[in-house]
Image (cartoon, helix red, strand yellow):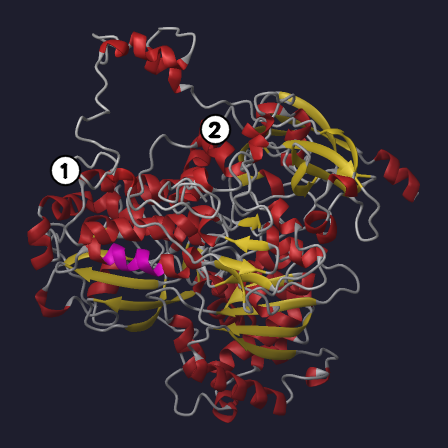
Amino acid sequence: MAEEIKNTAPQNFKVTIDNITVEVPVGTTILNAARMVGGEVAPPAMCYYTHLKDSGGKCRTCLVEIAAGSTADPRPMPKLVASCRTNVMDGMVVKNITSEKVLDARKGVVEFLLINHPLDCPICDQAGECYLQDLSYAHGAVQTRYEFKRRTFVREDIGQYIQLHMTRCILCYRCVYVADQLTNNRVHGILDRGDQSDISTYISKAIDNDFSGNMIDVCPVGALTDRTFRFKNRVWFLKPMDAHRDCDKCCGKVTLWNRGDEVYRITSRKDQWNEVQMIDGKPAWICNTCRFDKKHTSDWVIEGPTKIDRHSVISQGHYVGSVGTVKPPDPLQKVLQGRKPHLLLDIHDQSEVNTAEVHLSEIEGPSVFETFNGDPHASGHNVTDVKIGVSTNEKGTDSTNPNTP
Amino acid sequence: MRKLLLEKANIEGIRGYDVYRREGGYKSVEKALKMSPNDIVEEVKRSGLRGRGGAGFPTGMKWSFLAKPEGVARYLVCNADESEPGTFKDRYLMEFIPHLLIEGMIVSSFALGSNVSYIYIRGEYDWITDILENTIAEAKQNGFLGKNILGSGFDCEIYTHRGAGAYICGEETALLESLEGKRGLPRIKPPFPAVKGLYNCPTVVNNVETLAAVVSIINEGGEAYSKIGIGKSTGTKLISACGNINKPGVYEIDMTISVEEFIYSDEYCGGIPNGKKLKACIPGGSSVPILPANLLLRTAKGEKRLMNYESLADGGFATGSMMGSGGFEVLDEDQCIVRHTLSLARFYRHESCGQCSPCREGTGWMEKILKKIENGKGELKDIDLLWDIQRKIEGNTICPLGDAAAWPVAAAIRHFRDEFEWHVLHPEECLKRNYGLAHYADPIENIVTT
């Protein structure tokens, strides 16, 4: 009898998302159903992480409109729902990018996420693989309407390998779930509440656990960064390579980020949704030994270049997937007003403001003065003053240059 | 009218068991234990009792939604985390007639099959926790709690649990999290507490006043209870009145009286002090929309507005408000709406749990803009920005705190926009005379006297 009931019960639910109907197993969330459709139909998710139980529902970027609850009860839902935590029903009709209401709400959420974010992408290690960056390209406003002082926190080293930059945090709670579900005990968490919420440990530097490094991988922004990689390189200059080694703690299947022969950092393998890949039916979390201690190519068996099928600067324009294909508007065409220079440098020839009247070679060299005898202090013409007081640091670079580390 | 909840609250010594029992206390327990649990639920359904915590959801229906899987415990939790600014009715009830709550909880626990019930009480009410502990001990000594109550075979224990001063823990799922010993963060629904609540077991969370009202429903029958009041607003309701009125305090009303009568009659608020005029009123606790005097006393259709769920909500949020939890705040002509909205926005910013982004970031942003306008530094575009922010918070959050933070701001701008503009256009004057415009205070011609 029980067997019969099982057979007659539907195994799959039909759900229509943005006019595309898919059949998904019972118990699938709307977000995962939309990911099966793929492309623009998949709502963005900042806090949901498939492999972390109970995650999701917090950032509200994945809100969707339910135009019809199910075949049995086709009433629309009054409020937008978080697609990552709502299961599909048979005959459900979901509107994501086809709903004005959703796009408006999403724009609002992105604005809320950004009002206290420092927008320090130029000096952030996450830049290039940051989900918040992608999200604000797709849904953010051109200019902020927030005119108050942004919330700041002091940077903190939590443990030997991880630096916490709380100012950048969007409070997705993913790292808390990693600590809860992957490590033996959680020693960090959310302190305080509301807009003063702070992720921290009571005892600084206390995070020391074999799997704590995965917190860096799940962080959607640059709040948790790899201390062994900080400021070493930009991610888009590195070449990702799939590699593996025998590891007794984890699966040992990783992505190496190389430049030449040098391994700059090691991460777990990510899928197109920026989540850890499933390998052999399990999420391929990696241990801290693999992540932080094996930084030589000789430690690894290289499998080949990683395919990045996510539109991001890390893929250097060669992405193969279909996710997030919204590109930011290219300002160059607008600036050039229809002109098509071969090289950007041609702008000099084209410029109406700086039209060259005299060829540079015709100008007499101003750099040499008759009175200058090589000693800058000997005469009134301290032409080399600008160099006085400049010291070089031990690397021989110019220390007045703010771009020098 | 006859009072049901506070009828005996003024009797000397009613806080103690002996006087309470002599005055007819615990009769409903004796009666209920002879009934079947389902009959009690039916009786409560028949009474039309609606949740007194704010949302006004029918209690009987809520009880019938409780999942009853075999071999799984069920819990009743009393929400005594009354933290809404302007609401203090539960405090009065628990402080002066605590046995009524315990009696209601025993009956409700029996109806729901809860052998362990909790009272989650607001942290600031520490002296009331002592009173309740004492009350529970007295009830236990006299055989109304503990094992095999009155020989019926029903076991029930009631425990109190003090919160730690967070408004968010008045939200039922945050309350359950806090009760379990975790951070008070609202859960994502579904599943609802009726299916998975406390310790993953089916749970009913009810307000103090709701549970206390069960006593008279059992004593006198649901039919009799439903005859009090009007329409779907049955029974009596406690209103905690405060603000610019002559007689602030907790009043028990049947829901047939008009708002005008409630404010001006000597039986209730006793009018506005110092001969001032009524400007605005928040009829149901700080989170419900504020109404200007003209819309408060009459609905948009021109009908007299009554103190009940339907009439206060008449006209939707455009021209109406909500019954809410019954925190009735009256503002006279000297009160500044901008300053008032700022103080509410500050409260919600402080109490946002920070779990979901619209509420966490939006409440702080709204407070900053309001502070700017209040201090004479605002611009006209700030008012539109405020409207846009509240619109993007409302309905997009995990729990109703986002809505509660958005509604007061929305209503203040909707009804008092020119007062915001006055602040912006008169930056120096608004610092000296911070009550904005007073012309909303229409003179009331026919004052009801009873």
Residue A55 belongs to magenta span: no
Numbered label attached to residue B425: none
How many marks on residues?
2
* Amino acid type indicated by mark 2: Ala
For the N terminus of chain A, the image quarter is top right
**Residue A34 image offset from top left, x and y in percent:** 64, 30
Q: Residues within 10 Å of mark 1 (few under 14, many from 20)?
A: few
* Amino acid type indicated by mark 1: Gly
Quarter where residue B180 is shown: bottom right
Q: Which residue is mark 1?
A: A380
- Residue depicted at 19% across the width and 53% down the height: B374
Report the magenta stretch's main SS: helix
Please tell me whether residue B224 is drawn above or below residue B446 in the rendered image. Answer: below
At mark 1, the secondary structure is: loop
Whether residue A271 sits left or right of residue B14 in the image: it is right
- Residue depicted at 49% across the width and 22% down the height: A327
Q: Which residue is mark 2?
A: A138
Whether residue B71 sits left or right of residue A350 in the image: it is right
Are dots 1 and 2 on a single chain? yes
At mark 2, the secondary structure is: helix
Instruction: Report the magenta residues as a range.
Output: B340-347
Between B350 and A196, the one nearer to me in the picture: A196
Is residue A71 at all visible to an observer of this figure? no
Is residue A96 at all visible to an observer of this figure? yes
- Residue depicted at 44% across the width and 36% down the height: A105
